[in-house]
Each structure stands twice: as C-alpha cells, then as structure tokens.
Image (tube, helix red, strand yellow):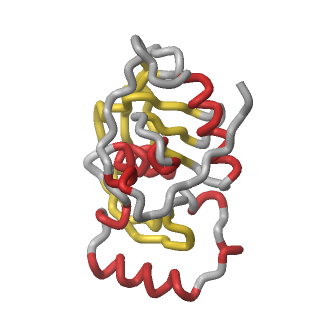
Amino acid sequence: GEIMIYDLVPTTHPMLSTKLERFDFNKPPINPHELANNLIETMIHYKGIGLSANQCGLPYRVFVLWSNPTKVMFNPTIADVSEKEVMLEEGCLSYPNLFIKIKRPMLVRIRYMDSHGEAHTDKFTGISARCVLHEMDHLDGVNFTHKANKFHFDQAMRQKNKRTKSYNCLLYTS
C-alpha cells in the first residue's frame, strides 16, 4: 500500500492515556508491515527518535525506534534493566518544546516481535534505552509528564515558554 504519514493526536487525546492491548498476529487488526512502515515514515517526518502507535491515535501495542536499521517493536516487554539510573532531559513529539529531566535505567533488555511476528531480544543503552523506555510507557498510557518530579516538571514548563521551535534537534525529540 501507499505510505501514509499519520497525524499526531493532541496531548488531551484519550488514546495517549490508554493502556494498549497486545497486537494479535493470528488475527491482525491491520497489516503489521504497513503499520510499521507508516510509523517509521511518520517518525522521520516529525524528526523524532521514537514513536508509538497511540501518539497517532492508533490502538496498537507497537512503537518504532530510530536506529540503524530502524526498529519496530510489537508487544514489547522488559526482560531486564540496569540498577544504575541516569537523570537526563527528554522530549516527546506529543509535547513540542517540552524537555523534562527524568531518571531512567542506563541499560534495558527488551523482548518484542517484529512485523512478521518473530520474537527477538535486544539490549539498548544510553539514549536508545531511554527512548525505548519512553515509548514503552506510551504503550501503557503513561506520558513522560507523569514521570517527572514536580520541581523538574515546573522547571521544564517555564523553559518551554521561552523556547522557539527551531531548537528541536533530533536527539531531544523522542
């Protein structure tokens, strides 16, 4: 099929606070390959480094990750995380120009299925680990604004109001 660039839903959209059901590869509600390609193209279009289906208003438990090659993860589960955590600023395509300091594990191991329904386990570190965990939160209806302590959230909101759009570099828009 044709590649489709999805619209991002507004932050108030109920799909962003919905815990998504597992994608059923036996009775696929949508062609998983088309869904995967559209999500990748949408992520690239909006200059993100990660994007979950529900950010586009779609009720499927899948997200894509900017990497080489680009990863598509259906029904991901956390196999393991490092005890060591890092506090870093992160952004979200659903919240333009908002960058919040959030503490997350440095390393994560994820089990997931690709668009063929084949199972994989991958290890991610650094920005990729953070991005994976951020997208997995989306699939559970948790937005990064919920993860921040009040001090860091208020600080981020104050800075957001001073920022211009041009500041959005690739790394900070997961």
Image height check: is 129 above or below 17? Answer: above
Image height check: is 100 above or below 7? Answer: below
Q: Which residue is at 54% across, 59% downward? A: 93
How far across and down, in percent of the image, does residue 55 sit? 48, 50
Q: Which residue is at 33% across, 62% downward? A: 103
How far across and down, in percent of the image, does residue 100 sit? 42, 71
Image quadrant in which you'd find residue 5: top right
Q: Which residue is at 47% across, 47% downward? A: 57
How far across and down, in percent of the image, does residue 29 sit? 45, 23
How far across and down, in percent of the image, does residue 11 sit? 44, 64
From this viewpoint, which residue is outermost toward the right? Answer: 2
45 vs 15, nearest the viewer: 15
Image quadrant in which you'd find residue 69: top right
Image height check: is 53 above or below 115? Answer: below
88 vs 94, nearest the viewer: 94
Is any part of residue 156 visible from this angle?
yes
